[in-house]
Image (tube, grey):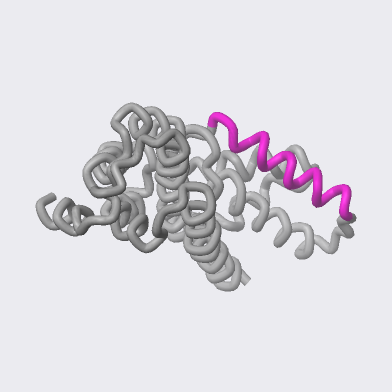
């Protein structure tokens, strides 16, 4: 069962990062998603290996400014904010996934209203979540307590939590970068010449 949770989590994060973020960049920023992912790739690598959104901020800032042409002020504010607010993977997908798994494991019968409450709780918990390793365990505990689920079940997911945390952090960092690009683009603060060039490749190689 834990293997399926692990697999499901990685599938969810991959779909969210690729589909949702690509759609957002293309629709709201009117920019190429392919160029975006090439530019932010080094930050994704660091996030995956360090499991720390806060620790990845310097690399995220560098890639946003030098590889994607995002204005310095927008990049600095949005990347820092994104490492502490939102956190779709740690405070959204993971708590919801483990809560649904636990509901079915315990044989509870949740209705539409209860699942809607679950979504609301994960949204509230995501505000002020710190981007450091282990955050997902804290957010899951808060969600379980709010839903009346046994918080002891959070320990059940401990064996795979660290493995999942790599994908969680990468998804969070990608989300913060997506927000930065969209914000800058809507304000006319993206240097599209830099964005559409091969600068992303040069930045990654030189650093």
**In the shown orientation, is residue 42 left or right of residue 159?**
left
Residue 92 location, x and y as percent? Answer: 61, 47
Whether residue 159 is visible: no
Q: Is residue 52 above or below residue 27?
A: above
Q: Residue at x 24, y 48 (%)?
A: 194
Apparent side of residue 111 relative to residue 18 in the rendered image (left or right) = right
Using the image, determine if residue 28 lies above or below residue 7: above
Choose top left, top right, bottom left or bottom right for residue 62. Answer: top left
| Residue at figure coordinates x 88%, y 48% from the top left | 113
Relative depth, front residue between 108 and 22: 22
Q: Examine the residues drawn in magenta and state their main secondary structure.
A: helix
Residue 201 point in image, percent of width and height: 19, 59
Left-right relation of 62 to 88: left
Asked if the magenta segment contains residue 49, the reply would be no
**Residue stretch rendered in magenta on the structure:** 112-128
Against 95, is 131 above or below? above
Q: Nearer the viewer, residue 169 or 14?
A: 14
């Amino acid at each position: 069962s834990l293997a399926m949770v692990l697999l499901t989590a990685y599938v969810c994060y991959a779909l969210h990062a690729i589909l949702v973020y690509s759609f957002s960049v293309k629709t709201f920023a009117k920019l190429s998603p392919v160029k975006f992912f090439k530019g932010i790739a080094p930050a994704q690598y660091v996030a995956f290996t360090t499991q720390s959104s806060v620790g990845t901020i310097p690399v995220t800032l560098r890639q946003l400014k030098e590889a994607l042409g995002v204005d310095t002020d927008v990049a600095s504010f949005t990347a820092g904010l994104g490492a502490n607010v939102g956190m779709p993977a740690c405070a959204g997908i993971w708590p919801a996934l483990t809560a649904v798994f636990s509901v079915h494991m315990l044989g509870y019968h949740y209705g539409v209203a209860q699942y809607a409450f679950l979504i609301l709780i994960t949204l509230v918990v995501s505000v002020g979540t710190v981007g450091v390793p282990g955050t997902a365990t804290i957010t899951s505990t808060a969600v379980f307590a709010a839903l009346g689920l046994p918080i002891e079940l959070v320990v059940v997911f401990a064996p795979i939590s660290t493995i999942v945390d790599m994908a969680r952090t990468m998804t969070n960092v990608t989300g913060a970068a997506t927000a930065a690009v969209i914000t800058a683009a809507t304000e006319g603060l993206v240097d599209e010449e830099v964005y559409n060039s091969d600068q992303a490749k040069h930045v990654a190689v030189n650093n």
